Each structure stands twice: as C-alpha cells, then as structure tokens.
Image: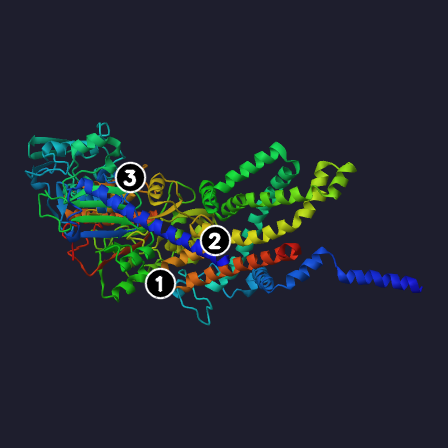
Amino acid sequence: MDTQIAAKKSVNQQANQSRGIWADSFSRLLRQKSAIFGLIIVVTLICAALFAPYIAPYNPEKGILGDRLQAPSEGHWFGTDSQGRDILSRIIFGSRISIQIGIITVGISLVVGTFMGALSGYFGGVLDLLVMRFIDIMMAFPYILLAIAITAVLGPSLVNAMIAIGIVGIPIYARVVRGAVLSVKENEYVEAARAVGCSKSRIIWRHVLPNCIAPIIVQATLGIGTAILDSAGLSFLGLGARPPKSEWGLMLNQGKDSLQTAPWAVMFPGLAILLVVLGFNLLGDGLRDALDPKLKE
Amino acid sequence: MKFLHNKRVLTLVILLVFSVLVAGCGQDTGSSGTESKDDGGQQAAAPSEKVLIWGRGGDSSGLDPANVTDGESAKVTINIYDGLVKYQRDSTEVAPALAVDWETSEDGKTWTFNLREGVKFHDGTDFDADDVVFNFERWMNEDHEYHIGGTFDYWGYMFGGYPGVVESVTAVDQYTVEFKLASPMATFIANVAMFPFGIASPEAVKEHGEDYFKNPVGTGPFKFVEWAPDDKVVLVKNENYWGEQAKLDQLIFRSIPDNATRLMELQSGTIDIMDGITPDDVATIKNDDNYQLTLRPSMNVGYLAMNTEKEPFDDPKVRKAVNMAINKKEIINAFFAGLAKTAKNPLPPSLWGYNDAIEEYKFDPAQAKSLLAEAGFPNGFKTTLWAMPVPRPYFPQPQKIGEAMQANLAEIGIEAEIVSHDWTTYLDKTEHGEHDMAMLGWTGDNGDPDNFLYVLLDKDNAVAPAGNIAFYKNDELHDLLIEAQQEMDQDVRADLYKQAQVIIHEDAPWVPMSHSTPPIASKKTVSGYVPHPTGVEPLDTVDIQ
C-alpha cells in the first residue's frame, strides 16, 4: 500500500514540473508583458467580431446623410463618416472582415506554402531546386506590387484581394517549412520510421511536419497582421473591398477627402489597423520566444 | 564597436540622401533643357515669365478636339484652336473668330463665311478657305483619308451623323467658304462655334495621321509644347496670334485626381488655380484671404442613366421606381455644399425651352417598392451602378454620391454594386453600353436645348459610341427633336422642347440629379479669369502677378 502511494506521488511531481509542451509554452508566453498586450488586442478583436451585432450601436452600412462628418460626441464616440454612418460601428463590423481576411489569406499561403516547402525539403534534389527557384522568382517581385498585379487581373473585390495576398504570402511559408523540414528529417525518429517501413507520405505528415509546427505557428501569427495591413492597402487603392463594406482600408480611402475638415474619419480606422497589426506582431514575437526558448539565449 | 557601426550607418544614410538630392536636381535641369529646345531663349527669360498652372481632376483623353467629348480635353484644346466662330466670353452668343462675318440664304440652307486674312497656324502654314474645307470634310466624311484617330463623335451628335445635315463645303475663293445644308438647321451657327470644330492645320493632320491627337496644331492663342500623360499638358504663348496676345507666357494643365491633394497643392502654391473643389472645402477657401472663389454659371446636368437595353431597366416601371428611390435633395445637400439645385429635367433651368410644369418624381421608397413589385421584382434585384473615378463639375464627389445612391436603392431591395474604371475607360465602356446604371453628366456646349436633348436622349445617338448612354429610343421624341432642329422660330422650338421633356419624363430613362454651379478656386494673384457657362474657356485674358 505504502509503496503504491509513493509511486503515484512521484508521477504527480513530474507532472508539476512539466505539463507538456503546449502548457509550458503558454506559461512562458504569459511571462512576457508585450505578448500579453498582443494577446489582449487579438482577443478583443475576436470578441468584437463575434459579438459585433450586439456591441455596435448603429447599423454600419446605413447612414443618415444629414448627420454626416460629425465630430466624435456622446452619440457617436468616433464621429460619423461622409455618408453619415457611425464610425465606431463600422470599425466593430470591420473587425469581422479583418479576421476573415487574416484567416483566409494565411490559410491559402499556409496550405500551399507548407505543401511546397515540405516536399521540397524532404525530397531535395531537382524538385527542391525547381521549387526554390520558383519561390525566388516570386520573391523577386515587390510584395504589394505583385498583389496589385493579381487583383488587377482578377478584378477588384474583397475575395480577389484575399486570393492575391494569399498567393504572395506563399514563398515565406514555403521557405520556413523547408528549413524546418531539413533540420528535422535527419533526426533518429525519422530514421526509425523509415526503418520500420513507413510510407513517405506518412513520414512527412505524421513525423516530420508535426515537429515543424512551432515556426509555422509563429509565421502564421505574424502573417495575419501583415495580411490585414496589405488588404487594407489594396482596399485603400480601390482594389479590395467595395463600398458599402465596413473594411478599414476602404474607410481610410473614403475619409481621405475630408482629411482637413474631418480627421476622425481616417484617424480611427487607421488606429484600428495599427493596433491590430501591432497586436498580431507582438503575439507572434511572444509565441516565437515561448515555443522555442533556446532561441532567446 | 557598436558606436562605430552606427556611425558607418549614419554616413551611409547621409551619402544616400545626398545622392538622391543630386539626382533630383540633375533631373530637373534635364527636363527644362528639353522644353527650351522648342523655344530658344526661354530659359534665359525665365524669371519674368508668367506661368499659370491649372490643377484639374483628370487628364485629357486627346488633343484633337474633333475626337474628344470630355471637358478635360476641351479645356486644353480651346486654347490651341480657333473655330470659324466662337462664343462671347460670358455667354453663348456667337462672335467672329476665323470668320470675320457670315450670312445665310433666305431658305436657311446656304451659309457663306468670309474668312480672316493673314492668319498662320502654329506650324507656320497659312490659313485659308481650303483648310476649312479640309477640316470639315475630314470630320463629316467617313471615307475621308484622314477621318482617322477617333470616331468624331461630336460631329455626329451635332449634325445628325456622317455627313449628316451638311451636303457640301466649298471654297468659293481663297477667303470665302460656302456650306450647303440638306435642310435648314436652327443651331448651325451655334454648333460651328463649339470647341470640337476648331480648325486644325491640314499639314499637321497629314503628317501625324493616327497620332495627331498627341500633336495638335491650330491657330489659337497658345501653342502646344508637351503632353506627359496623367501628369501635365504644357502650352506656350503664340507670339504670332492674329488677335490680342495672351497675357501668360506659359500655361500648364496638371492632372491631380484627388480633390484633397489638389487643394493642398493650391495651398502650398504649386498650382495657381483649380477646379473640382470638394464642397466641404469651399468654406476653407472662402475664409482664406489668399484665395478667391469663382462660380461658373450653371449650364449642366448630372444624371444616373439606366441602360434601357438591359433587363430589368427595359421596363419603365423599374426606371420610375429608381427615380422615386433616390433622395436627391439629401444627396445634394450633403455633397454639393449648396452649390447645386435638384434636377427634374435633362435641361438646366437657365436654358430657354425648360419645362417647369413637369412634376418631379417625389422621393417615396414605399411607392418605389410597390412599382418594383408591379414590374415583377417584389424582392428587388442585383445590378451594377457605375460611378466615375474623377470629380466632374456636375458630380464633385462621384464615388460618394454613388454610395449614397447605393444606400437609397438598397432600401427598396435593389442591390447595386459600385463599378469604377479609369476615366477614359469609363467613358469608352459606358459609350458601348457595358453598364446597367451609370452616372454621367453634361455641360452644355452651345446654349441650345438641342445640345442636351438630341445629343443625350435621341435614338440617333443611342448607337455605340453613344452620347445617349441610356440607349433610350423613342420615335415620337425623335420626330419632335428633328422638327425642332429644322425650325427657325425660337418660340416654336421652345414649345417643341417642352413637349419633348414631357415624353422623357414619362419614359424616365434617367434619374436627373443635379444642376451645379461649379466652384473654381484661384490665388488672389490670378486675374482676368471669366468662367464660361459651357465649362471651357480660352485663358488668353488671364494674368498672374
């Protein structure tokens, strides 16, 4: 009886020391002030998006022309835009579009980039050469210029802007994943998997990729911020979201005409973009440090 | 070590900045060098030179006036060319230009012009009756060797096709030209005075062919120097002008599409005069002693045309529903800063023949909705609403006005997507009927109702490239408009145009939106500027201190 109890205790003690890689990383993340700040922003954004219809004081797409360009007041905390719409409500509803943009664009880049990077890193040789040169060519174009070219071909719409930004994001993921795969594939457990006769796809998807997940997560988090910024850029140029959507970049575009008389129409959407991008960047940086503590040393 | 590293970076930055500065200066001297090629000694005279820079919302689409229809082109070409006759500075009364006088026969079918002697084109060739014949034949005969470089839209609009009402143009002697018309035409002399019918140098037309629109040569007060697309058009004074010489030495038209940017340029002094002021900024200009605001007399209309060839706009009920759904008054209060009136007719009220008895479609979303239901669209439909990319005198903030219309239409279930293209493409695509609904406008060219109703709503002009972008065809209206063209008595004509407006109102191919008095802002140092109701004026009387 006694010995049994002792054994259980020692297991518990071990569990206290290390609760698994995810819990560990999370506690490391919480130790960084800037990452917490980033996390708060991101969580706020997600809440705003989820509960937009309950939080927003007005309909974001319906304005009263008679109330146009009103300065921030009790009735309209962030003022109204040129169509008499409440800017706060538009920013809250805009968070939905931003999250959508972040997830979809990063999703496109991530899936395609991971696929390309994993194959090229694992198999090497001619395939690696071809894929990586193709990636080099893509990277030779300035990021936003390539996105502009793609939307110009596809036509201006939010979906096309997302596709464009998704495509131009591919090279980064491909490179990150390839590098990670290269370092992982020489490990003993991969060799062991090969030795017991696992198929190549099983080795890649079950053994190699899960061990490359940390850099991918970091890159994806950072990427969401960039994607939101770029899509705002495209919308500002008239190549992304179409009116009357409450997209932040589009709001900047519409507010710029009255920059001198109604600065709030550009100030608040601009601040929203700034904060969210900052939030994702801080969180991404924090995640990098948390997931790979050795890196910091 | 770290310090040293930073220092190196600093040096590098300084070097970079310096090299950019040097490169910038180098470029500057380079460009003024090429300009001086055309005009020797211009650089030496630079300090005392009078240069006026006009800031505007869009670039010209071409500088061959016969082949353009947009105001941004006309604004430039009117300074380069003279027509046989021209308008008075502040009205659409006809005055002599290249013709010193003219007479018409009893039956109104023969017009004889006596031409000015001793006039030279900018390329040095002499002007005479053969040049007039060449130009008119080039415009009116589709099989003319130089009927190229465009589609000569304005000739078709104004003279009823190619060759249209003009049967022949002949040189009686070196300085006399005779026109024979198929039928009398009340608006003939007023039409000839319009900007598209500026006389071009036949030598230059022959030399440049398709590219003539980039190399204009006329007899006007300014000579063409350079056109950098989407940037600027540069003109210089014509020292050999037959009339009083221009006060300015150089005239530059710069395209600055963004209203706010253009205003900032005016405030920072890089341009001297500008049109297309965002109405919200009008007060800023008014309250600043360094600037003056001039209002152009209103002779325009801004409208939303519905493509009657496309479903569901082929149904007049749908068109009426759209008319009732849009809250014009609110839109005008919001986006015109009080510098416009709501429209109920295609004609501006300042024009004779305006039918004030017509009762406007009242803003009434409920009735609009029931009309839509009657037409078979109880839940509305999806469509496109085209809004131009650049501010126009009749729509100073087209994108925002479009968005407000979009919101109005959404109330009755019409989901309209806003479509926009660059200005030249926009004009081209709407002329070819690619739109469902499109915003456009018109500034009268000759002070005659014909110039609005026939050009914009007659079936003759509903073929691509169309002036009638509603592609609206009504035979009854056509007969009235043609009758009015051939009638010489103005009272009878006014009556015909009033009837025409009743038909148009009933068929509702447009939502007539606004008649504006477009504001022009300039520095206090600019004098002698007289805005013309037609929206284009030669700037030879303008001076700058």
Query: Can residue B447 be seen in the rendering of this structure?
Result: no
Task: Give the label, 3 or 1, closer to the camera.
Answer: 1
Q: Nearer the viewer, residue B195 or B103?
A: B195
Q: Are marks 2 and 1 on the same chain?
A: yes
Quarter placement of the N terminus of chain A: bottom right
Q: Are marks 2 and 3 on the same chain?
A: no
Tell which subunit mark 1 falls on.
A
- Provide residue B140's location: percent of width, then percent of height: 21, 33
Give the residue at mark 3: B461
Q: Nearer the viewer, residue B402 or A140?
A: A140
User: In the rendered view, does B282 fall on the left or right side of B52?
Assistant: right
Indicate the secondary structure of the residue bearing disc 2.
helix
Q: How crowded is the residue under tag 1: few (<14 C-alpha within 10 Å), some, or many (20+)?
A: some
Tell which subunit mark 2 falls on.
A
Q: Amino acid at mark 1?
A: Gln
Tags 2 and 1 touching, CB below 8 Å:
no
- Residue at screen point 68% across, 62% down: A27
- Residue at screen point 39% across, 40% down: B434
Q: Amino acid at mark 2?
A: Ala
Residue A171, image quadrant? top right
User: In the rendered view, does B146 fall on the left or right side of B463?
Assistant: left
Give the residue at mark 2: A232
Tags 2 and 3 touching, CB below 8 Å:
no
Give the residue at mark 1: A260
User: In the rendered view, does A55 fall on the left or right side of B445?
Assistant: right
Tags 3 and 1 touching, CB below 8 Å:
no
- Provide residue B66's location: percent of width, then percent of height: 22, 38
Which tag, 2 or 1, sits closer to the chain's start?
A: 2
